[in-house]
Image (tube, rainbow, N blue to C red):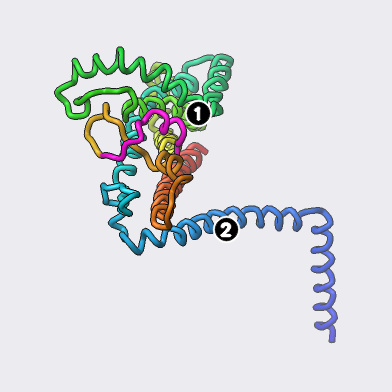
Amino acid sequence: MATSTLSQQDSRLAVHSLFKRARGGDEIAYLLTLASAVGILVIVGLIVVELWINSQPTVHRFGFSFLTGTRWDPNGDHFGALPFIYGTCVTSLLALLIAVPFGVAASIFLAEMAPPGISNVLTFLIELLAAVPSVIYGLIGIFVLVPFNRDYLVPVLTHLFGYLPIFKGDFYGVSFLSAGLVLSVMVVPFIVSVSREVLLAVPREQREASLALGTTKWETTWQIVIPNASTGIIGSIFLALARALGETMAVTMVIGNTPKITASLLSPGYSIAAVIANEFAEASGSLYVSSLIFLGLVLFGLTIVINALARIFVITTQRRGS
């Protein structure tokens, strides 16, 4: 009898505690934040499911050979995604080859070399570049970058490296090279901002210990700070790659929109995002539409995987620093 009475009292206390916490907002806040987090996962899952369902005509017709096909002929109902995958990868990798040295060097200067006031101002200005609409970059690419490449850059490249396959052929302005240069400017802010944060996350004690042993500031940065922040810097590069893969308007305006595979960076090409933006509105027939949707699913998958890897690298660096 006494045990039963104690159980009833414990139940009342638990219920009273629950209502008290609910009145304080803890349980309500927990449920709301949990619903928000789960809702995001549900939305991502629904996007994947919807893209997969609507791409079934292409999957049934071509299978996964769609990813290796090189012919894109809407009139003949024959579709292959490889030229677009190739164009997306080439322009993104070219952008990284140009942006990574500048971005990492700038982040080292802002985190280790520059005075705090100058560092904060320059970081703010660099991060503003990420807020510029991509169509503005496209316009700058058409009216500034393309003429500059045609009149100055490409003649020098062909004169010095014309024997290489990547610099052979005629240059008409719009090309893989122009798209890669525009993308490099667009992804630099991501590399700079994230790399600067992970460099600052390296414990100050390691810098002070290195300087106390008689090393210079640059030796400390090169031998102590950068190795400890290397994983996070790689993460920033992956984030920049994900940004470059998904860019649409700026690339569409300067890449040339020609679905072909060529070794020369001076030739026009096409990307996944550009073909979806250009052709989806005028696509007729279920096979044509589903092929474009399947391309979107491929691009979505690439972006998700690369962003996940970048986050893992950044988190690993932050834990190491703490």
Tell me the magenta residue range.
Answer: 246-260
Q: Is residue 114 visible?
A: yes
Side of 86 where 203 appears, left or right: right
Which-is-in-front pick, marks 2 and 1?
A: 1
Mark 2–mark 1 distance (CA, rounded to whole Å): 31 Å
Q: Residue at x 54, y 29 (%)?
A: 133
Give the image location of residue 50, x and y in percent: 50, 58
Element at label 2: helix
Q: Nearer the viewer, residue 161 or 250?
A: 250
Could you classify mark 1 by the number of other residues whose Cα lies within 10 Å: few (under 14), some (14-19), or many (20 or more)? some
Which of the two discs, 2 and 1, labels the residue nearer the N terminus?
2
In the rendered image, residue 66, in percent from the top left (x then y), is placed at 31, 54
Instruction: Residue type at mark 2: give it.
Output: Val
Question: Residue drawn 43% across and 34% down?
Answer: 240
Above or below, 303 against 265 in this view is below
Circles 2, 1 touching at the beta carbon (< 8 Å): no
Q: Quadrant of residue 12?
A: bottom right
User: Residue type at mark 1?
Assistant: Val
Q: Residue at x 32, y 36 (%)?
A: 258
User: Which label is found at residue 135?
Assistant: 1
Whether residue 142 is in magenta: the answer is no
Q: Please give the name of the residue rendered at 45% of the width and 26% of the height, measured from the top-left corner.
A: 138
**Circle 2 Cα neighbour tier, 10 Å, few/some/many (<14 / 14–19 / ≥20):** few
**Residue 179's spot in the image, x, y percent?**
37, 29
Q: Closer to the camera, 175 or 73?
A: 73
Judged from this view, the residue extending furthest toward the left is 163
> Which image quarter: residue 90?
top left
Residue identifier under label 2:
42
Which element is circle 1 on?
Answer: helix
For this orientation, the residue located farthest to the front is 75
In this picture, is 231 found above or below 180?
below
